[in-house]
Image: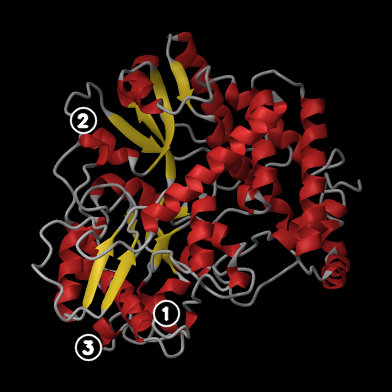
């Protein structure tokens, strides 16, 4: 039986990769993949065909959440681009969200010219030459802004200057300090809540974590589910926020690497090499009281959530008023705003801070930002297939021009603000009123670290499975810690084999910060 399942998995993976290869293989003339209706009648004079994955948020012809009219903003802007460059055609395509499929296309040079991938997933492949570093273009003027002739306009001197959320956009530099990503828009999470239920129970959005837990007790006593969550939100968002609340006060003594490029945007961020070093110093182990406490806070929060954390349709229980709150991201705004059958008033607040009543390690600072770049565009090696050399490729220049054209404010607004889903990341483009609460949240500082992107997928998968088991009382805290420390140790060892970590430099910085740590409590060596 074991041999059968091994065979079954291998055959299934092979079929996925094969199907993906077929879907993205350059189509014959007259049978091209396109998401754009009413194309020009012929392709006479077309020299460059750019294949672009805009993502489901902007795919022409789709109707988000089944509400409103089909999207056409991207179609209109791309048509305008083609009118400027009659020798260029832009095909908007969809691709499977399977890493094996994308790797197959990238390694064979058949990937779309512009793909949408979380840049943290790109970082693991940058040494393979699959992606184009965008720094030379971002540090140069945007030609479509330069031609307006106004030096005061963002983008006139550097394309970089057009992006509103500089900390997040520039903070997406890879470990090699090069940028492979255009942070096209922003996404943030928040607690959507039923104002009618809050009024019925006699509560308001909480100011502190303890107030929140008290409020959820009252909601539960009134017969409602206090908070809707799933296991992925616990494993990603909740881990990062609680970690930050417990460790933020330690940063002056444990933040060992100050990258000259990113530090001005990601102050105090703990990168993978720092995590590895700190782990060897006893952090994130049994001897680290903050790390032990992190998971206990998540366990406590879980007691107020829906029974099945593996469920994915959280919206149903919220809109039918079975639950008072749901933790979701900005696209859910459009789902609620467009629901004409919704029978209650809703609002948004962010998770409240820890205080000394919550933990002796509480930094007593506002919850940080865990959202950030939503749609992230990367340029692949397919973009310079005309010459095989990025330095001489006319085709690559045209691909970059498309991205630059999309970020011109009047073009960009037609795409991103077509409906209330994601926040604009271009200066001068207004925020839709229903998304303003999330824009306010994004004014906060960025998170201390992103655990799900620090190590490989194996680490994240194991943490996800064991955390769900722990939250559902399948294992106790001690057993979960055994799993977590073993998992972290394996991930650290694997990373040390793959990366050249300068432990000597980290140790020097560690020793230099010893006087700072001497004033701190609850360190692993206490």
> Of the numbered discs in the image, which one, if any, rests on residue 384?
1
Q: Residue at x 27, y 33 (%)?
A: 336
Q: CA distance from mark 2 to mark 3?
A: 43 Å
Where, quadrant-wise, is the N terminus in this rendering?
A: top right
Q: CA distance from mark 1 to mark 3?
A: 25 Å
**Residue located beneath label 3 in the image:** 147
**Residue located beneath label 2 in the image:** 339
Is residue 489 at least partly visible in the picture?
yes
Is residue 254 at least partly visible in the picture?
no
> Of the numbered discs in the image, which one, if any, rests on residue 478?
none
Q: Nearer the viewer, residue 242 or 206?
A: 242
**Residue 363 at x, y percent in the picture:** 66, 46
Residue at disc 3, secondary structure: loop
* Colour approach in the figure: secondary structure
- Horizontal side of residue 111 vs 239, given as left or right: left
- Horizontal side of residue 355 vs 53, given as left or right: right
User: Quick check: 372 above or below 68?
Assistant: below
**Residue 375 at x, y percent in the picture:** 39, 57
| Circle nearer the N terminus (1, 3) | 3
- Horizontal side of residue 306 vs 257, given as left or right: left
| Circle nearer the N terminus (1, 2) | 2
Q: Nearer the viewer, residue 109 or 287?
A: 109
Q: Nearer the viewer, residue 444 or 10?
A: 10
């Amino acid at each position: 039986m074991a041999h059968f399942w091994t065979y079954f998995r291998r055959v299934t993976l092979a079929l996925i990769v094969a199907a993906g290869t077929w879907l993205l293989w350059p189509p014959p003339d007259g049978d091209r993949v396109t998401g754009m209706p009413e194309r020009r009648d012929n392709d006479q004079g077309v020299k460059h065909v750019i294949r672009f994955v805009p993502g489901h948020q902007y795919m022409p012809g789709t109707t988000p959440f089944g509400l409103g009219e089909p999207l056409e903003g991207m179609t209109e802007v791309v048509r305008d681009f083609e009118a400027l460059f009659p020798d260029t055609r832009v095909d908007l395509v969809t691709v499977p969200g399977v890493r094996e499929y994308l790797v197959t296309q990238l390694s064979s040079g058949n990937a779309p010219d512009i793909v949408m991938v979380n840049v943290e997933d790109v970082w693991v492949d940058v040494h393979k030459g699959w992606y184009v570093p965008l720094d030379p273009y971002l540090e140069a003027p945007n030609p479509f802004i330069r031609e307006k002739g106004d030096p005061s306009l963002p983008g006139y001197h550097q394309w970089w200057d057009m992006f509103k959320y500089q900390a997040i956009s520039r903070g997406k530099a890879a470990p090699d300090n090069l940028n492979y990503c255009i942070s096209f828009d922003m996404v943030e999470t928040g607690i959507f809540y039923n104002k009618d239920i809050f009024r019925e129970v006699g509560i308001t959005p909480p100011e502190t974590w303890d107030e929140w837990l008290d409020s959820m007790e009252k909601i539960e006593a009134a017969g409602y589910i206090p908070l809707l969550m799933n296991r992925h939100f616990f494993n990603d968002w909740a881990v990062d926020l609680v970690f930050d609340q417990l460790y933020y006060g330690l940063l002056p003594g444990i933040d060992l690497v100050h990258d000259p490029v990113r530090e001005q945007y990601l102050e105090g961020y703990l990168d993978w090499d720092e995590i590895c070093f700190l782990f060897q110093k006893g952090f994130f182990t049994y001897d680290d009281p903050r790390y032990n406490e992190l998971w206990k806070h998540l366990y406590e929060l879980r007691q107020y959530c829906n029974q099945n954390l593996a469920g994915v349709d959280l919206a149903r229980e919220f809109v039918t008023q079975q639950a008072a709150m749901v933790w979701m991201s900005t696209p859910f705004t459009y789902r609620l705003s467009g629901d004409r059958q919704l029978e209650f008033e809703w609002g948004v607040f962010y998770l409240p801070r820890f205080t000394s009543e919550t933990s002796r390690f509480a930094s007593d600072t506002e919850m940080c930002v865990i959202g950030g770049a939503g749609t992230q565009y990367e340029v692949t090696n397919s973009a310079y297939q005309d010459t095989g050399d990025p330095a001489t490729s006319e085709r690559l220049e045209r691909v970059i021009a498309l991205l630059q054209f999309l970020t011109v404010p009047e073009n960009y607004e037609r795409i991103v603000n077509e409906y209330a889903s994601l926040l604009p990341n271009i200066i001068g483009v207004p925020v839709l009123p229903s998304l303003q609460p999330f824009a306010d949240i994004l004014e906060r500082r960025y998170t201390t670290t992103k655990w799900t992107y620090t190590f490989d997928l194996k680490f994240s998968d194991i943490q996800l499975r064991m955390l769900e088991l722990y939250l559902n009382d399948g294992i106790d805290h001690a057993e979960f810690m055994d799993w977590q420390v073993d998992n972290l140790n394996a991930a650290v060892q694997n990373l040390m084999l793959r990366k050249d970590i300068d432990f000597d430099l980290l140790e020097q910085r560690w020793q230099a910060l010893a006087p700072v740590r001497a004033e701190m409590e609850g360190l692993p060596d206490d």
